[in-house]
Image: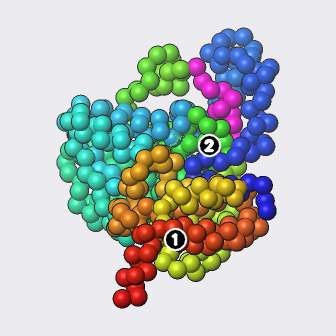
């Protein structure tokens, strides 16, 4: 048995060796404040500007369109609040998003609703994909912003971002996308895809936690979220997380390198996993089979509870999740699974397995070896399962 099988890469990832090595000098000899004038300060400044350039290149952005933040959540908050308050000055107070966004987006739009903004939450179909006609119909003269995630963190569904970008451009509405889960899995070109703002997080692509990126297209006016010093060209105060920024740039650059090769390797593993898991009775795959992140597999097993499944997997060395890390701890079923039309009792029995290019076929085989037994054991103890079996034999 492998010591630890980590298949929760949508929650966070291991740091890659090259990322750690790139970061260490900025914790040891190059600890200068990038705003200082002496040499170790200037070196830190140079490292940040080099990182900015590297990241800009990954998304076909310009170097001065890249801003560093404290993570994906801050990038989402800044993009949405920064645009909303700026556009409100012109009387535009309507925002369009979807029902399956990450909470960094949904809780921000809910906050803005309390501040007097109007928010339209687009439905998704049973695969978790928005309808672009519904989007187009929702746009009004006072629409300030469309914010739709690139790929979903729970069910891996990929949205039609090119089409959404085209629609937003046609109506001259600002378009933000939370691309945290898409980076490294899909090629992103902000110019070609008409993306005005894009959120990225380093720790989802083998980079450090607590570092994010917000791309803001040149000419887009956005209010500051963090006020203070003149860092990030006066747009985002606070002494830069130099080592984190350097690590983020190495991680993002590696993620965007050889995407096709990685995607075909990871999706082969994922498809093998999906085909085998679906042999378990009363199981289903959540999300689209085709418009799906290469590493994402999300299942429901009738008659069992996701949390107990996770505990038993953990006892056998497997780190997976049920829905997202942010909702675990609460007993509410995932808003994403409910939005794709699953009833509460089925949404409760979900399991998300998210792979990265560090995972191997041996690890998948190990999961496949233990999973059916765990599910049987839980079902034997489940009154819910008894009921399902009874209804089926009637
Ligand atoms: C993880 C995640 C975030 C939050 O990023 P942090 O860096 O953890 O703040 C936002 N959106 C999506 C889709 C994510 O998966």
Screen quadrant of the N terminus: bottom right
Query: Gap between marks 1 and 2, in whole Å?
Result: 36 Å
Q: Earlier in the sequence, mark 1 or mark 2?
A: 2
Determine the residue positioned at 68% across, 34% down: 246
Asked if disc 2 is less than 8 Å from ligand 1, the answer is yes
Quarter of the image with the C terminus is bottom left
- Disc 2 marks which residue? 203
Q: Residue at x 77, y 67 (%)?
A: 362
Residue 379's disc number: 1
* Residue 246 covered by magenta stretch: yes
Residue 322 location, x and y as percent? 51, 57
User: Quick one: 48 or 263, which is closer to the camera?
Assistant: 263
Q: Residue at x 51, y 67 (%)?
A: 381
Q: Secondary structure at mark 1?
A: helix
Q: Residue at x 35, y 35 (%)?
A: 81
Q: Is residue 156 left or right of residue 90?
A: right
Q: Position of residue 270 (x, y in %)?
A: 63, 69
Q: Which residues are magenta?
A: 239-252
Q: Is residue 377 above or below residue 254?
A: below
């Amino acid at each position: 048995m492998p010591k630890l099988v980590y298949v929760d890469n949508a929650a966070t990832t291991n740091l890659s060796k090259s990322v750690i090595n790139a970061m260490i000098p900025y914790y040891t000899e190059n600890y200068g404040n990038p705003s200082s004038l002496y040499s170790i300060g200037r070196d830190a400044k140079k490292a940040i500007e080099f990182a900015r350039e590297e990241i800009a290149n990954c998304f076909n952005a310009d170097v001065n369109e890249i801003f560093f933040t404290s993570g994906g959540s801050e990038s989402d908050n800044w993009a949405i609040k920064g645009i909303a308050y700026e556009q409100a000055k012109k009387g535009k107070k309507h925002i369009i998003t979807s029902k399956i966004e990450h909470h960094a987006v949904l809780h921000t739009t809910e906050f803005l609703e309390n501040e007097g903004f109007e928010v339209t939450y687009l439905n998704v179909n049973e695969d978790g994909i928005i309808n672009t006609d519904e989007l187009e119909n929702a746009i009004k003269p006072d629409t300030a912003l469309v914010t739709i995630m690139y790929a979903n963190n729970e069910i891996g569904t990929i949205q039609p971002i090119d089409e959404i970008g085209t629609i937003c451009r046609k109506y001259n509405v600002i378009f933000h996308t939370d691309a945290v889960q898409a980076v490294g899995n899909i090629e992103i070109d902000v110019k070609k895809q008409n993306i005005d703002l894009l959120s990225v997080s380093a720790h989802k692509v083998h980079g450090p936690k607590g570092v994010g990126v917000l791309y803001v297209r040149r000419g887009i006016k956005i209010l500051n979220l963090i006020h203070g010093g003149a860092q990030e060209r006066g747009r985002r105060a606070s002494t830069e997380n130099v080592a984190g920024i350097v690590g983020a740039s190495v991680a993002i650059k590696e993620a965007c390198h050889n995407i096709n090769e990685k995607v075909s390797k990871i999706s082969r593993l994922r498809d093998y996993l999906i085909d085998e898991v679906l042999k378990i009775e009363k199981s289903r795959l959540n999300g689209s089979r085709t418009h799906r992140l290469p590493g994402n597999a999300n299942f429901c097993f009738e008659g069992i509870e996701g949390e107990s499944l996770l505990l038993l997997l953990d006892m056998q060395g497997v780190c997976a999740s049920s829905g997202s890390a942010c909702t675990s701890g609460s007993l509410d079923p995932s808003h994403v699974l409910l939005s794709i039309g699953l009833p509460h009792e089925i949404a409760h029995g979900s399991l998300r397995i998210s792979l990265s290019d560090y995972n191997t076929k041996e690890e998948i085989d190990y999961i496949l070896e233990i999973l059916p037994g765990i599910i049987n054991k839980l079902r034997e103890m489940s009154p819910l399962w008894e009921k399902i079996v009874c209804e089926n034999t009637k």
